Amino acid sequence: MDTTPAQRLASALQKLPLVAILRGLTPSEAPAIGQALTGAGFVLLEVPLNSPQPLDSIAALATQHPELLIGAGTVMRAADVRDVHAAGGRLIISPHFDADLVQEALRLGLACMPGVATPSEAFAALKSGAHALKLFPAEMIGPAVVKALRAVLPASVPLLPVGGVSPDNMAAWRKAGASGFGIGSALYKPGQSVAQTTAAAHTFIQNWRSMA
């Protein structure tokens, strides 16, 4: 049984290392969109905190899928971490590295994936206890940076590019050493239908698995 945050995240990444970033999701849409994604095979769902009533959506998804790793993105303050925890979220993702956020997530037993863009940020995040690293904004960095980071980071550290990821460019990132991806608007846009979300989910999963 996965008992620690690190074990829960490692287990989820092993099943499918793709994080669904559901920016703009509303609480009323959350159950159907969540079912579409999890039915396709997603096990990591992120509701950015700049979405409408994000804590309500996180609570709905966490209740619907207690076995999966549901949480928040765009987490900016330690108080946000506490709010996500209270809503039932178990995953904290931020666009940046902030030691206070990481330490609060660890204190509450949540998996934590801060955003980094440089080796200095990456090693500082790991020193603080981060369980995985979000490479952001990926479209400004490129696969070459992943390759360079992989040369110095511990091989066991999950490194997930986020920003501009599409089915067409996943292979270059994967070849450079990406462990997985955070996927935003190419997977889900506000108001998108369940059918569209299901189709996009299957496309991303098929592309990922074809590279294995």
Image: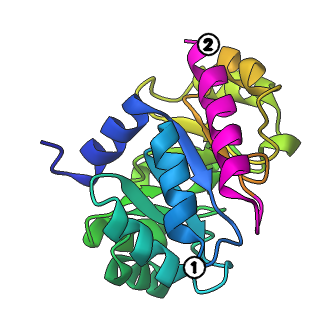
Q: Determine the residue positioned at 77% across, 48% down.
A: 163
**Residue for badge 2:** 210
Magenta run includes residue 150: no
**Residue for badge 1:** 28
Residue 34 is situated, as x and y percent measured from the top left of the image, at 51, 58
Q: Quadrant of residue 69?
A: bottom left
Position of 66 with respect to 162 (left or right) is left
Q: Is residue 98 visible?
A: no
Q: Disc 1 and disc 2: Cα gap in Å?
A: 34 Å
Three-letter code for the amino acid on which mark 1 is drawn: Ser
Q: Determine the residue positioned at 32% across, 70% down.
A: 63
Q: Quadrant of the N terminus?
A: top left
Specify which label sits upstream in the sequence, 1 or 2.
Answer: 1
For the residue pair 155 and 172, the one nearer the viewer reads as 172
Secondary structure under the numbered disc 1 in the rendered image: loop
Magenta range is 189-212
Q: Determine the residue positioned at 40% across, 77% down.
A: 59
For the residue pair 35 and 6, the one nearer the viewer reads as 35
